[in-house]
Image: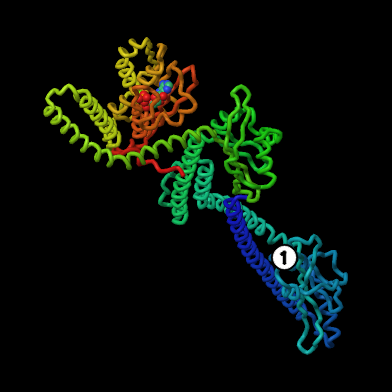
Amino acid sequence: MSLKSQLRIAIVTLVTLLVIAQSLLSLRLAAEDKIRDSMERAQVVADQIKDLVIQRVNEQARAVQPPPASMEARKRLWHHLVASDPELPGLLFKAAANATTVIEAMVADDANVILASTLPAREKQTFPPLPDLSEWQKRPLWERLVEVLIQPQRHDYAITFPLGVQSEPRPILNIRVVISTVLIRNAIIGHVQQMAWVSLLTLMASIVLAYLFSNYLLRSLDRLSARIESIATGQFTPSKAASAKEAKEFADMQSKLDVLSQQFRGAQEDTMQLRSNIERMIEALEEGTLLFDPDQKLVRASKAAEQLLGIRHAQVAGRTLNEVFPPSTPLGAILRDAVQKDQGVRDAAVTVERGEAGPLRLLVNVESLESFPEPGRDSLLVTVRNAETRHQIRSQLDISTRLAAISRLTGGVAHEIKNPLNAMALHLEILKSKLDGDERVGKEVEVIGGEIARLDRVVKTFLDFTRPVEVKLRDLNLVELARQVAALVWPEAERSHVSIEFDAPSPRVVVRADPDLLKQALLNVVNNGIEAMKSGGRLVVAVNREEDEAVVTVTDQGGGVPESVRDKIFNLYFTTKQKGSGIGLAMTFRIIQLHNATIDFASRVGDGTTFRMRFPLVDASSEPATPAHAGGASAVESPR
Ligand SMILES: Nc1ncnc2c1ncn2[C@@H]1O[C@H](COP(=O)(O)OP(=O)(O)O)[C@@H](O)[C@H]1O
Ligand SMILES: [Mg+2]
């Protein structure tokens, strides 16, 4: 039962009890009044009858001559006078009629034989002994009321006056007035009934009023409970301002509820935000995650997990661990062991067969997650990641660390070489002028001059490479830039019988980049592609949008990168070409790093190579751009 109903019942009951008590009290007072009133009247009637009898007996006795001599004679005379008086019954009746409660008035002799009565048929009968009215009046009022109003049988009570002479202690006549409870009831019942009706009406009116009043008082409770209801169902519209008539406590409570609801809403929004962030994060992770509930049923599998394991969430959702990964498979065996021993697994390497997608080497982690509502019953988190990607990241880190180390070590040395080289070139010129066209050494001097110039170029490019670069980032349409590069290499490609294709489904793919640096980076890769196709072919430059990345791919149909040199092609001065410098890809790598981007390649010897550069998209990421200044690749820490 609601608090409001309880309070309402309490109020109505209280009022009802009060009204009933009040009614009973006034009923009692009124009944007492009425009874006393009728008793007094009966007493008056009894007095009147006494006077009447005394008067008539005295009058008639005076007329009797001679007066009775003995006491016995007087008694007989008096009895005779009363019994023979024809008017007395009528007079008695008249007197008795003054009191509604008197059922009979009579005069009896000393032996209680009735001499005259308001009921003539009773004459000469013996008057039955009746309890005295004064006794009755001493009884408690409630008892008397019950007797009068409720008990069906009639009770009679008498008021008795003995009449005699002063010298004689025994009475000669007994005057009796009989009062009946039936008549008392008749006398008061009308009044009592009327009062009962009034009480009943009062009671009903009070109940209705109490009900209405309690409603009025408790309407704030309704408002509060409606408010709580709306908060519970997630509606947070602020409540209407409490009216001034409302109790202060209720108004306080309501405003506190409002504050609570605001906080609740905030917390709920935070949680939702956090949840969606976490989900986005999980989806963005290259790692695949699978979550099994305490009953080992799969509750979620991220997209990456679907891809890496070659499963579809829709098909495996709700299945058990053993069903998704049968223990007969290597991965299933690892998971079963982890569960049985209740032990986590770190980076266990395993090869999964993925049907058409082909086998893949994965690193598997297993962790148990404590579940909050039921401690002790743990969920299972399985994460898988491509072992190859990890290898690639590691090799990229290796390259950048090596570049950083080289530039730190050799930057100073290069300067030390450049100065003597300049001096040597200068002295060679002086030597040349002193020799003045001497045929014998002219050729050697030329060779020395050429080598000095070559050394100078090498040192110069090296210095270029190691010098801190100023990067001027701005929003840049990658499609436009790639198209310019393709156009730039066109003449060179034509000469090598290479056709250039440009492919960009979207006209605008915006990244934050330094146009000059990026053009250079792309140019190096495109040139390598053309150079790789010695007998001509097709080179495709493509710009695509992939989720929140911009991807530029350069695909050639050249001889491919042999397995043995794959780890080295980004190294500075690494080249397999006779006239190569080995600077192109190193420079590209560095520029790509300065743009917060990545570069990798896939190659099949004999078929060709694809270089792929990935840039963060401007509209997909609110991350600030890379720092404007970066010296070498020194920002990258060693992975070990
Ligand atoms: N598209 C490609 N196909 C095959 N090999 C390539 C390709 N691009 C680069 N390479 C290899 O990487 C080496 C380094 O390239 P790079 O740094 O541009 O220097 P260079 O072009 O001066 O040799 C090349 O000598 C070549 O062996
Ligand atoms: Mg090159």
Query: Residue at left 43%, top 44%?
Result: 240
x, y percent for residue 458: 28, 31
Label 1, ligand 1: CB separation under 8 Å: no
> Is 533 on the left-hand or right-hand side of 434?
right
Is 238 or 426 nearer to us in this picture?
Answer: 426
Can residue 52 be seen here?
A: no
Residue at x-position 20% and y-position 27%: 445
In this picture, residue 229 sits left or right of residue 520: right
Q: In x, y percent, where is residue 81?
A: 81, 75
Q: What's the residue at 87%, 78% (across, down)?
A: 111
What x and y, as percent, mark residue 260? 47, 50
Seen as rendered, the residue at the extreme bottom is 167
Q: Is residue 173 above or below residue 241?
A: below
Q: Is residue 401 above or below residue 591?
A: below
Residue 542: image quadrant is: top left
Q: Seen from this angle, which residue lies furthest front? A: 440
- According to the picture, the residue beneath numbered tag 1 turns out to be 145
Relative side of 369 to 410, left or right: right
Q: What's under tag 1, amino acid-wise?
A: Leu
At 24% from the left edge and 25% from the top edge, which residue is drawn? Answer: 447
Q: How is the image coloured?
A: rainbow
Residue closer to the observer: 406 or 57:
406
In depth, the one of 616 and 482 nearer the eye is: 482
Left or right, 91 with respect to 465, comes to right
